[in-house]
Amino acid sequence: MHTVKIEAVLGDITLQDVDAVVNAANRQLAGGGGVDGAIHRAAGARELREACRPLAPCEPGDAKATPGFRLPARWIIHTVGPVYRDGRHGEAEVLANCYRRSLEVAEQLGARSVAFPAISTGVYAYPRREAAEIAVRTPRGRPGTVTLVRLVAYDRETWNLYQELLGG
Ligand code: AR6
């Protein structure tokens, strides 16, 4: 049994040299803005859209995999985060499910290293600190074949939160 290492980096998820990158997608898996747009552009928008079409819809908290196409990563795991309202509509549970399900799918693929963006903290307006707590806590101590979880912050505030919560 391996213990999973959790690390935080500041950077662009499309450049991560890992087995699988997670995408913060929408239910239709149709591409969009933010990290979703960046992943679609970098992977190859046409191929990725075609690969996603038969997998849609993806419910919030669930995750589905496609090839990584032109990304350094071999797979893309598309998950759909919660739209944040007031924290009383099960948002935390759905966000934790995104991390949990993405790791399950990674296991099924045989991926050993997985990079996550800060799911739901952009357009979906999840408060950064609460989201970072879930991102750090959910993969912790998880048994299985994934040995590296890399939390990719795109802004310094998120990176600082990850460092603080990881005790770095
Ligand atoms: N690498 C890593 N992180 C990034 C990158 C990047 N290249 N670009 C943005 N981020 P968002 P959501 C960060 O809005 O809130 C899309 O249109 C960004 O700073 O991408 O889950 C989908 O189609 C933020 O911290 O995703 C959905 O409709 C984080 O990624 C909707 O947005 C997530 O921001 C999903 O919204």
Image (cartoon, helix red, strand yellow):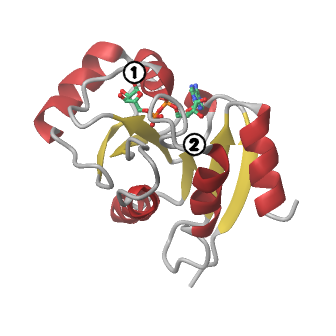
Identity of the residue drawn at 25% across and 32% down: 29
Quadrant location, the C terminus: bottom right
Camera-side residue: 124 or 166? 124
**Assess mark 2: CB under 8 A from ligand 1?**
yes
Q: Secondary structure at mark 1?
A: helix
The residue pinned by badge 2 equals 118
Is 146 displayed left or right of 53 in the figure? right
Q: Secondary structure at mark 2?
A: loop
Q: Amino acid at mark 2?
A: Ala
Corner quadrant of residue 44: top left
Marks 1 and 2 in Cβ contact (< 8 Å): no
Q: Point out the residue furthest to the right here.
A: 168
Against 130, residue 52 (above or below) is above
Is 67 displayed left or right of 3 in the figure? left
Q: Could you say where residue 89 lies in the image, as x and y percent from the top left?
A: 35, 56
Q: Residues within 10 Å of mark 2 (few under 14, many from 20)?
A: many
Corner quadrant of residue 80: top left
Against 120, residue 31 (above or below) is above
The residue pinned by badge 1 equals 40
Label annotation for residue 57: none
Identity of the residue drawn at 33% across and 64% down: 108
Q: Point out the residue furthest to the bottom here.
A: 1
Q: Amino acid at mark 1?
A: His
Identity of the residue drawn at 59% across and 44% down: 127
Q: Earlier in the sequence, mark 1 or mark 2?
A: 1
